[in-house]
Amino acid sequence: MTESKDQNDRTRPGGIDMRELAGDRFPPPAWHFEKIEKEMASPEPKDRMMGVISRMGDQRVPDLSGIDWDAELARFGNLDFPSYYRQPFHSVPGGYLSEAAAVGDRGAMEAIYEEVHPRRSLGIREEIALLVPEEARFVVDLGGGTGDAGAAIARRLPEARVRSIEASPFMLIAGAHQNGQHENLELVQGFAEETGLEAASVDAVLITLVFHECPDKIKHTILAEVLRVLRPGGTLVLSDTLKDELHSFRGFYEPYKQEWMDFDPEAALAAAGFEGIEDRSVVSSLWTLIARRPG
Ligand SMILES: C[S@@+](CC[C@H](N)C(=O)[O-])C[C@H]1O[C@@H](n2cnc3c(N)ncnc32)[C@H](O)[C@@H]1O
């Protein structure tokens, strides 16, 4: 990465050269760079984004430098990624279909949550893992990213089988390197809205920080899928960022920010047919709800 003299240069947010970051493995379309530059050109302050970028280098992160990306990517088939997913999330060219998103994930999460938890994102994950009922034996984490949340559940419930379902092969590859030591955690490629799981086969589902990155139609489809795969009485733990919190990270492009500002998670859960909806938030910048499939 090249340092820029002007940290606010639209093409170099935080001094990072976005075109270099993209790499040449899956070259992102030109409109990704246009969206990123437009986000940087907005007049709102970018101080929180800059703070995260500057703190990322101070975090303890797994060493992923030895990954042979070409060899590992060759293991994955050609999933047909829907257009809602092929966006430059967080101003990363290529979005989740990029090495940069996967390699930077732990450092970014730790830097963001350093502000609200003494043990940063990993500490929050441990607290959220406590919300999964201890008798659960099959737990599914949807949109599981690099598997840090699934790993927290796998450690807490060694008798349980945990499956992290994630669309991006890049996130799965990084996840296998940073969480591969957990024998009861499997990282599987797939979509949250169409898991392929048997009906009523899952004891608990976790979804963290995925909904703010999905259009409303997909959020509702995912909730219907969760209701289908949970056994009667099974638990959903749903957690995501507060509206104002998301809004304050200007500069990190979020394609569905406006829909997020209007989304009411409790109403969506009730409309989908969940019951026993309870607020079990663990830190100030995230809401965390639990809900049950009736029965
Ligand atoms: C902000 S990250 C959160 C990852 C993880 N849940 C966590 O808490 O760190 C969002 C993740 O959801 C994945 N994702 C988004 N939409 C998805 C979908 N429809 N199906 C599967 N994964 C999805 C992205 O690829 C990305 O890894």
Image (cartoon, rainbow, N blue to C red):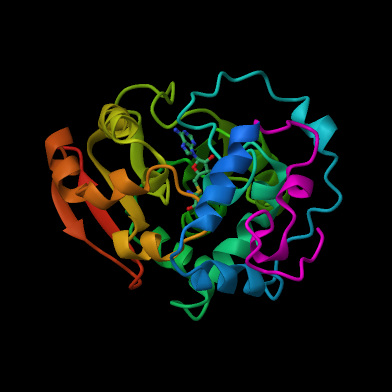
On the picture, is 267 further left or further right than 31?
left
> Would residue 145 be seen by someone viewing this image from the given angle?
no
Residue 48 location, x and y as percent? 50, 71
- Quarter of the image with the N terminus is bottom right
Residue 90 included in the magenta stretch of the image: no
Q: Residue at x 54, y 24 (%)?
A: 81
**At 51% across and 39% down in the image, what residue appears?**
163
Residue at position x 64%, y 38% in the image: 94
In this view, the residue in front, 26 or 223, is 26
Q: Is residue 46 visible?
A: yes
User: What residue appears at the point 73 percent right and 31 percent down from the top-left corner?
Assistant: 26
Where is the C terminus found, in terms of image quarters?
top left
Q: Indicate the quadrant where residue 186 lies.
A: top right
| Residue nearer the viewer, 81 or 175 | 81
Q: Position of residue 210 (x, y in %)?
A: 42, 45
The main secondary structure of the magenta stretch is loop
- In the rendered image, residue 59, in percent from the top left (x then y), is placed at 67, 72
Vertical order, 91 against 196 (above or below): below
Quick check: 177 left or right of 147?
Answer: right
Q: How many marks?
A: 0
Q: Which residues are magenta?
A: 1-29
Magenta stretch encompasses residue 9: yes
Depth order, front residue of 86/159: 86
133 relative to 89, above or below: below
**Residue 265 falls left or right of residue 59:** left
Position in image of residue 230 (x %, y %): 29, 34
225 relative to 17, above or below = above
Residue closest to the eye, 121 or 150: 121
